[in-house]
Image (cartoon, rainbow, N blue to C red):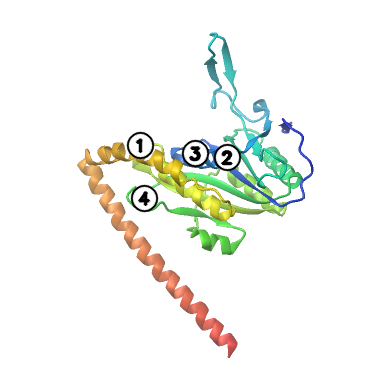
Amino acid sequence: MVEFAWHRRVRQRRRPAALILALSGWTDAGEAASTAASTLERLAGLVPYAHVDPDELYDFTAVRPLVEIDERGVHGIQWGTLVLRGPARQRGPAIFSLAGPEPQLRWKALASQIAEVAQGLAIQHVVTLGALLAGTPHTRPVALVGFSTRPELARKLDLLPSHYEGPTGFLSVAQGVLQSSGVDVTSIWAEVPHYLAQFPAYPAALALAQATTTALDLDLDPTPELDLLIARTAAEIDQYVSDDPELVSYVGSLEHSYEIDQRTRRSAERISWEAQQYLRRFNAE
């Protein structure tokens, strides 16, 4: 049975709250989503509230536990699982997070349990974070794809619509259940250059973290911490690309396609704006 095991007593909340949901694994290219979530957890000072028994969620031949040795030479096992974190004080920021490896088992039961917990914590808005490998150049701003049940927020975040159809992950299942339960959902995915799959995607993590602070109106600044990580890998990435003439040419072609896409999008937005202005004038007459 999928249930949260609570570490601390939580009173029934009345103040509206929000939840950040990010999973490592298939939906986390370059660990961008999990890095963004963990950065925001630290900045917000979130502490563990509850976890789910990993036996209920995981095939341990696919997500293996880690063996650790302490200073006395004693072996221990670290079992990865989903952990719910929240404010250290009852009157702390009304923000929670749920993060951990993407489960393999009992998706529908887990999604229902998350919706039940969200109701008890007065969570009215859930932001899900993901990252995907794409044909996008690392020399241009990170593109964000997604949707929001709050249309004005999708426009504010400048989210590109997704037209993907096919195999999906737990995030999509959870989003559907949460929406059905009356919770607003904003889905934000960062595009990660596929030719840099072996590098941590810190620029994408920063883009996701900044978008989350905007979506949830959080007074947090993830930029200094993640900019430092970006700087640590920038020279290595530049060297990796410049050492391969074919890759240099390929990145150039991606940059050209990126610029064309941007011009096409700006043109489409202009046409849409002009059509809206015309309809307003027509209706006014």
What is the secondary structure assignment of the residue under circle 4? loop
Can you say whether 269 is above or below 99 in the image?
A: below
Q: Residue furthest top?
A: 73
Helix, strand or loop under label 1: helix
Query: Where in the figure is residue 74, as x and y percent of width and height?
Result: 56, 9
Q: Earlier in the sequence, mark 4 or mark 2?
A: 2
Residue behind mark 1? 232
Residue visible at 37% across and 36% down? 199
What residue type is disc 1 on?
Answer: Arg
Crowd band around label 4 with a 10 angstrom C-alpha radius: few (<14), some (14–19), many (20+):
many
Distance between mark 4 and mark 1 Cα atoms:
21 Å
Q: CA distance from mark 4 to mark 3?
A: 20 Å
Q: Nearer the viewer, mark 1 or mark 3?
A: 1
Mark 2 — residue?
Answer: 41
Q: Which residue is mark 4?
A: 136
| Label 3 crowd (10 A; few <14 / some 14-19 / many >=20) | many
Q: Amino acid at mark 4?
A: Thr
Which quarter of the rendered picture does the C terminus lie within?
bottom right
Relative to residue 261, is residue 34 drawn left or right? right
